[in-house]
């Protein structure tokens, strides 16, 4: 029986979730394309969450005791399982989140690649190594290693229900932690599927990855369950609530929050490639991408050509849920209201609108939004200042790339961004000065597909990093050990040291460091 078939009833839907706890309340997730019920899930209360975390604690110890090789082997079995069932999972993502099957495949592929990288690089990044002891402790050996935190809580969003949480789950597991995952209430079936797949692929460490389902209260209970760290991905307002709840138990947090990412198109840019990237970066997944491009600043030298090219490309887009659709519905119906408000606000302030050829009267329901480009919107409007999270894009004409950079950086967010410039030096310089955690030059979103690169934001986009070596270290604590190799005749850290020893030390330090002015 496929894991999707197992998600048909409450009991089966909790495969991989807390199925041993009596939970009376349930909720259902629905297909945003048809409103059909995808699955019914338990609302796990604080007791159920605590019970899950307590079950994860011994599992974390056993998982850590497997060592890097044992974990790498099991993480490989998990990714093999995901790869073999990719179409089944993609179909579930399509049904529950609404994105096209092909986009779901892309998302799962990225998650599998990260699982592979995290498993393969954990030992080199985290394993014990010797560091130089230095002059003052030359008779000692010094060791550094990164130890797991125990149980890591992961709270995820719905927009990339596989890739986004896996950025924390894969790296936390590879670092030797157990994980309790609370998926979004909009995509619990995908979360339960991921945990059920883990139990099937890694039966001897089944409790190392568990899922609890429910709304914000379930997430808040996870924050209060005394986990070793809470990795949160979602909006900035919810992130603040998560931090406040975690503060009660001094639980450290990782914050992957929203964005208002911009693309800079410089004088010498390949305008056709930039337009293609801007349209994909803003409209794919119906614009519901934390690192999606929401604003473009194009220099006056390329602005007209860029707008013409984007307009032409917009005509090819068609929202829908069939195999030919370029993007799907808004997963969360309420988000449509925010997108419409931003568009109205922009046009009310004098912005011009360019829409594609998609005919809204043919859209299956009101969760589908037409691709919308807003031209020359005032910088004070909500379409420029707030996260829109829909299939919209603002394009603003600027004098030059310096003005583009200043406007790009004039936001409280700072997640990612893109620069299009032919000159390598210019592109790299703009990328480095962009106030964001990640920037792609002459492409969009590429950094997310390179497992060795860290992923995370600055400012209201959060702090901490998933992916890469930084992402592995994020789920560990550094452990320092020294071992005395030989005893010296004089021990400076003893009440028995002679006074002459510190005099000699002062003379030596004066000779070595005193010459620096
Ligand atoms: P959200 O903040 O509404 O919810 C995220 C998760 O938090 C959900 O699982 C939700 O149930 C839970 N939650 C809600 N209230 C809570 C509380 N009080 N305590 C604990 N948990 C609580 O976000 P969303 O709508 O699911 O996702 C969209 C947002 O996520 C956007 O802002 C997007 O930019 C952001 N996002 C960021 C990244 C990143 O890596 N930086 C990736 C994907 C999405």
Image (cartoon, grey):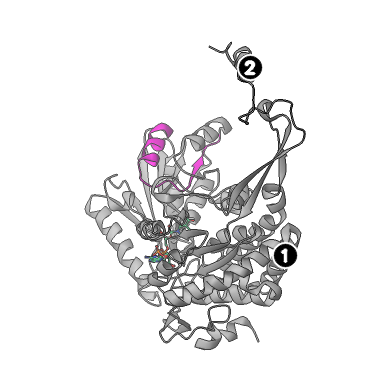
- Residue 466 within the segment the image draws in magenta: no
Q: Is residue 469 above or below residue 432?
A: below
In the rendering, at what x and y percent does residue 396 appear? 36, 44
- Quick one: 254 or 166, which is closer to the camera? 254
* Mark nearer the viewer, 2 or 1: 2
In the rendering, at what x and y percent does residue 142 appear? 70, 38
Q: Is residue 357 above or below residue 2?
A: above
Q: Is residue 350 above or below residue 139?
A: below
Q: Which residue is mark 2?
A: 500
**Label 1 crowd bin: few (<14), some (14–19), many (20+), radius 10 Å:** some
Q: Is residue 34 visible?
A: no
Distance from label 2 to label 1 (Cα)? 60 Å
Which label sits on residue 76? 1
Residue at position x 55%, y 43% in the image: 442
Stretch in magenta: 401-422
**Label 2 crowd bin: few (<14), some (14–19), many (20+), radius 10 Å:** few
Most extreme residue toward the front is 496
Residue at position x 40%, y 67% in the image: 220
In the rendering, at what x and y percent does residue 445 appear? 54, 51
Most extreme residue toward the left is 348
């Amino acid at each position: 029986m496929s894991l999707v078939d197992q998600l048909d009833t409450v009991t089966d839907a909790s495969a991989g979730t807390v199925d041993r706890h009596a939970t009376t309340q349930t909720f259902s997730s629905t297909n945003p394309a048809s409103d059909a019920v995808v699955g019914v899930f338990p609302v796990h209360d604080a007791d159920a969450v605590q019970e899950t975390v307590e079950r994860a604690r011994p599992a974390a110890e056993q998982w850590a005791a497997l060592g890097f090789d044992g974990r790498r082997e099991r993480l490989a079995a998990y990714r093999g399982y995901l790869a073999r069932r990719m179409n089944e999972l993609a179909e579930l993502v399509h049904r529950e989140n609404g994105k096209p099957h092909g986009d779901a495949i892309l998302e799962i592929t990225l998650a599998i690649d990260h699982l592979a990288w995290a498993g393969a690089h954990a030992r080199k990044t985290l394993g014990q190594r010797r560091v130089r002891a230095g002059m003052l402790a030359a008779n000692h050996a010094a060791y550094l290693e990164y130890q797991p935190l125990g149980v890591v809580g992961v709270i995820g969003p719905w927009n990339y229900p596989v890739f986004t949480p896996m950025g924390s789950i894969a790296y936390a597991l590879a670092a030797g932690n157990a994980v309790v995952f609370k998926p979004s209430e909009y995509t619990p079936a995908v979360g339960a599927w991921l945990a059920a797949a883990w139990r099937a692929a890694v039966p001897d460490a089944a409790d190392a990855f568990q899922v609890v389902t429910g709304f914000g209260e379930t997430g808040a209970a996870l924050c209060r369950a005394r986990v070793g760290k809470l990795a949160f991905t979602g909006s900035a307002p919810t992130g603040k609530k998560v931090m406040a709840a975690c503060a009660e138990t001094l639980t450290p947090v990782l914050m992957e929050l929203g964005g208002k990412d911009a693309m800079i198109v410089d004088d010498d840019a390949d305008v056709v490639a930039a337009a293609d990237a801007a349209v994909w970066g803003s409209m794919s997944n119906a614009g519901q991408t934390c690192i999606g491009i929401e604003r473009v600043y194009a220099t006056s030298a390329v602005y007209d050509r860029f707008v013409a090219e984007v307009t032409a490309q917009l005509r090819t887009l068609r929202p829908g849920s069939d195999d030919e659709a370029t993007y799907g519905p808004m997963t969360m119906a309420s988000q449509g209201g925010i997108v419409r408000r931003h568009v109205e606000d922009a046009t009310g302030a004098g912005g011009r609108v360019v829409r594609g050829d998609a005919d809204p009267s043919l859209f299956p329901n009101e969760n589908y939004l037409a691709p919308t480009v807003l031209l020359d919107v005032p910088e004070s409007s909500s379409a420029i200042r707030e996260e829109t999270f829909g299939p919209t894009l603002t394009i603003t004409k600027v004098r030059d790339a310096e003005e583009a950079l200043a406007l790009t950086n004039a936001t409280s967010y700072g997640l990612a961004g893109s620069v299009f410039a032919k000159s390598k030096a210019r592109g790299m310089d703009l990328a480095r000065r962009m106030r964001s955690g990640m920037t792609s030059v002459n492409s969009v979103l590429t950094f997310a597909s390179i497992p060795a690169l860290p992923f995370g934001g600055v400012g209201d986009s959060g702090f901490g990093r998933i992916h890469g070596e930084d992402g592995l270290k994020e789920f560990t604590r550094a452990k320092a050990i020294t071992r005395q190799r030989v005893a010296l005749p004089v021990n400076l850290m003893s009440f028995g040291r002679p006074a002459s020893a510190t005099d000699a030390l002062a003379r030596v330090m004066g000779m070595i460091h005193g010459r620096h002015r």
